[in-house]
Image: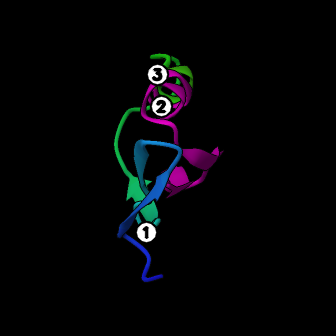
Amino acid sequence: MDRGQGFEKKGFVVVSRPSSRRIVRIQGIVQGVGFRPFIHRLAIELGLSGSVCNDAGGVLVDVEG
């Protein structure tokens, strides 16, 4: 079965979507404004996984789903 195709099981159709990964750098004033907790909540709502960390250049977001 190809990824992205649905399959039938006991009368239900389940659709499997291919996942993708993105690494994004956010620059600017992102410290002290709750940006990482916001990204964490958004990822949970969207069913994504990954990591968020601060570095000298801003915030680095590595997300997959």
Residue at 46% across / 25% down in the picture? 45
Q: Quick check: is 10 in the magenta stretch?
A: no
Whether residue 34 is situated above or below residue 44 in the rendered picture:
above
Q: Quick check: is 58 in the magenta stretch?
A: yes
Residue linked to disc 2: 39
**Which kind of residue does numbered mark 2 sit on?**
Ile
Q: Is residue 14 left or right of residue 53?
A: left
- Which sits in the foreground, 59 or 8? 8
Residue 35 image offset from top left, x and y in percent: 46, 26
Q: Is residue 29 left or right of residue 48?
A: left
**Which kind of residue does numbered mark 3 sit on?**
Phe
- Which sits in the foreground, 51 or 6? 6
Q: Which residues are magenta?
A: 39-65
Residue linked to disc 1: 18
Residue 15 image offset from top left, x and y in percent: 39, 54
**Which kind of residue does numbered mark 1 sit on?**
Pro
- Which sits in the foreground, 51 or 64? 64
Which class describes the residues within 10 Å of circle 3: few (<14), some (14-19), or many (20+)? Answer: few
Residue linked to disc 3: 38
Quarter-of-image position of residue 20: bottom left
Spatial CA span between label 1 and label 3: 25 Å
Which class describes the residues within 10 Å of circle 1: few (<14), some (14-19), or many (20+)? Answer: few
Q: Are marks 2 and 3 in contact (CB under 8 Å)?
A: yes
Mark 3 element type? helix
First along the sequence among labels 1 and 3? 1
Quarter-of-image position of residue 28: top left
Residue at 56% across / 21% down in the picture? 37
| Residue occupying the far front of the picture | 10
Residue 39 image offset from top left, x and y in percent: 48, 31
Mark nearest the camera among 1 and 3 is: 1
Residue at 51% across / 37% down in the picture? 47
